[in-house]
């Protein structure tokens, strides 16, 4: 299937399906197929967003999920929205635990715990609605000599979380799958333009020094 990938995050209470976020995704270059950026809400026309919601309802009911969190992957093709997969869990990489709460004011994991204990209206209301981004931070190939500026980047307004899975001295190779992505940024803003501005500010704040296998040096903003 060819098109733009998307995901829908929802909370289920019986027949009620509360969609808390729909994103559009940027993918890496072939031959690999991992995400490099997720932005909520998706920049699809309203008709496409409605099609995703309706298909999500059909899929959730078809597989019989009656409570808890769902994370469903879709792709928007020229022939319409198509399902890729669905799971009865929250989205990983901090989306369910950090970004959705920062976007909506809804403690998604807390809501699931309250629901499992039989609390009525466990989800509660959304107290606000912001745009959110998960930006995966990729590095040049080589050995990490220095990562600086993370503390300063965490102080940038809108940044929810930023971190790297590599440390100074680690080798960074070709990223072939999602679990090899070296870093991530979670942030919220009033709109998509604000999110992209935060990403640029973070990239200018975090300083990376890499030593390439050929001993050539890379030093500068992320």
Image (cartoon, rainbow, N blue to C red):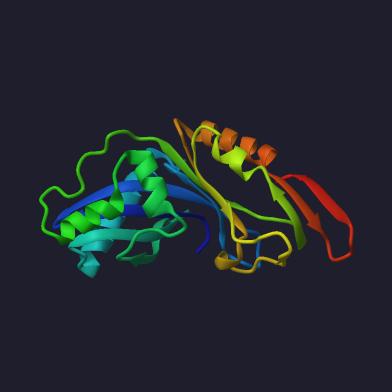
Q: Nearer the viewer, residue 170 or 131?
A: 170
Reply above or below: 176 against 114: below
Q: Position of residue 184 (x, y in %)?
A: 56, 52
Left or right, 173 with respect to 61, comes to right
Q: Is residue 184 visible?
A: no
Reply above or below: 94 against 154: below
Left or right, 160 with respect to 88, comes to right
Q: Position of residue 175 (x, y in %)?
A: 66, 65
Q: Position of residue 151 (x, y in %)?
A: 60, 42
Left or right, 215 with respect to 129, comes to right
Q: Nearer the viewer, residue 52 or 175?
A: 175
Task: Please tell me which residue is depicted at 37% across the width and 46% down the height of the picture.
Answer: 100
Task: Please tell me which residue is depicted at 57% across the width and 35% down the height of the picture.
Answer: 198
Quarter of the image where one finds residue 205: top right
Q: Nearer the viewer, residue 130 or 28?
A: 130
Task: Please tell me which residue is depicted at 70% across the width and 51% down the height of the picture.
Answer: 147
Quarter of the image where one finds residue 55: bottom left
Q: Position of residue 192 (x, y in %)?
A: 50, 35
Task: Please tell me which residue is depicted at 56% across the width and 62% down the height of the picture.
Answer: 34
Reply above or below: 16 against 159: below
Q: Is residue 143 visible?
A: yes
The number of callouts visible is: 0
């Amino acid at each position: 299937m060819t098109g733009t990938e998307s995901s829908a995050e929802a909370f289920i209470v019986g027949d009620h399906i509360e969609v808390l976020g729909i994103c559009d995704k940027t993918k890496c270059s072939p031959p690999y197929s991992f995400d490099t950026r997720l932005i909520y809400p998706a920049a699809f026309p309203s008709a496409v967003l409605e099609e995703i919601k309706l298909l999500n309802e059909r899929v959730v009911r078809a597989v019989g999920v009656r409570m808890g969190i769902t994370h469903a992957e879709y792709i928007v093709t020229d022939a319409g929205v198509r399902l890729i997969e669905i799971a009865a869990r929250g989205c990983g990489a901090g989306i369910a635990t950090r970004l959705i709460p920062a976007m909506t004011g809804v403690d998604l994991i807390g809501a699931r715990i309250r629901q499992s204990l039989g609390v009525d209206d466990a989800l509660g209301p959304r107290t606000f609605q912001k745009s959110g981004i998960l930006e995966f931070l990729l590095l040049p190939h080589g050995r990490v000599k220095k990562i600086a500026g993370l503390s300063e980047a965490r102080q940038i307004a809108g940044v929810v979380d930023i971190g790297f899975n590599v440390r100074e001295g680690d080798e960074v190779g070709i990223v072939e799958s999602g679990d090899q992505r070296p870093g991530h940024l979670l942030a919220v803003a009033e709109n998509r333009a604000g999110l992209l501005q935060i990403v640029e500010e973070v990239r200018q704040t975090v300083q990376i020094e890499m030593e390439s296998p050929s001993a050539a040096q890379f030093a500068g903003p992320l």
